[in-house]
Image (cartoon, grey):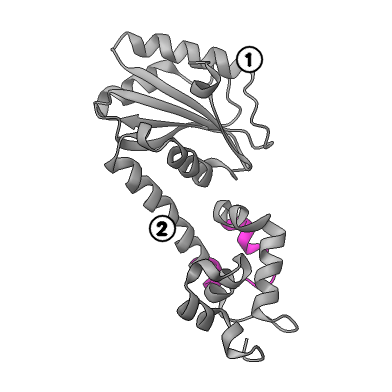
Amino acid sequence: MKDLPAAMRPREKLLSLGPAALADAELLALLLRTGMKGLGVLQLAEKVLGDLGGLSGLLQAQPAQLKRLKGLGPAKSAELMAVMEMARRSLQGGLATQPVFNSPQLVKDYLQLRLGNLPHEVFAVLFLDAQHRLIACEELFRGSLTQTSVYPREVVKRTLELNAASLILAHNHPSGLLEPSRADELLTQTLKSSLQLIDVRILDHLVVGRGGALSFAERGLI
């Protein structure tokens, strides 16, 4: 970094022009601070982003993925994980203070950060209050999801415990494919029927992958 002209160093560039002026690798280089033998910090940042599929991949990376990257020791991995967790909590905080209908993209961004890069399939539920603000987001089931492995009674039980007025369902596809399966549609209808008995609505069901999130509501499947 010291070999670069002062105006081109990420820290000085950020202070003079603002963070928006920095490239992804420059932002990451500020967090990494140092490179490794034979690789400057900017080069290391570019390599990390290349290995993980860019900034989006970094934000969704699991601890095990970071540990496998050469040049990221325990201290740097811990700092990156802390930044990623702060991003998730910031998005979750936004959903708790405003109706989800005001920010559908925020819901997708939050779920993609939370579920998008998991190596296993997870079924999560966003429990909402009467004003459609987030009460809690909980992973209720994991593994190969089918109509029989997601138990409606457990969803109903937790809904009553949290006094939720409506729900958003979500599950991830580790394959990255966002297209919902017939089993996904059947599961949604089963849960919808079960929750109608306690006067609770399902507002949406999102399929989450590394490349984004697909909304059942936008497809007219709810």
Q: Residue furthest right?
A: 38
Q: Give amino acid for label 2.
A: Met
Across and down, in percent, residue 106 comes to 43, 42
* Mark 2, other Cα within 10 Å: few <14 / some 14–19 / many ≥20: few
Across and down, in percent, residue 80 comes to 52, 65
Q: Secondary structure at mark 1?
A: helix
Q: Give amino acid for label 1.
A: Arg
* Mark 1, other Cα within 10 Å: few <14 / some 14–19 / many ≥20: few
Q: Toward which corner of the image does residue 46 lie, by quadrant?
A: bottom right
> Taking the image as drawn, is residue 144 in sight?
yes
Labelled disc at residue 182: 1
User: Which residue, given by chain and number where applicable, does mark 2 sit on?
Assistant: 86
Q: Toward which corner of the image does residue 71 lie, by quadrant?
A: bottom right
- Along the viewing direction, whichever of 84 and 29 lies nearer the viewer: 29
Contact (CB < 8 A) between labels 1 and 2? Answer: no
Question: Above or below — where is 207 with respect to 45?
Answer: above
Name the residue at 47% across, 80% down.
16
Q: Toward which corner of the image does residue 53 lie, by quadrant?
A: bottom right
Name the residue at 46% across, 62% down.
83
Name the residue at 69% across, 36% down.
175
In primary-sequence order, the first of circles 1 and 2 is 2
Labelled disc at residue 222: none
- Along the viewing direction, whichever of 100 and 192 lies nearer the viewer: 100
Q: Secondary structure at mark 2?
A: helix
Magenta stretch: give its range: 63-78
- Along the viewing direction, whichever of 110 and 217 lies nearer the viewer: 217
Question: Above or below — where is 49 with respect to 153?
Answer: below
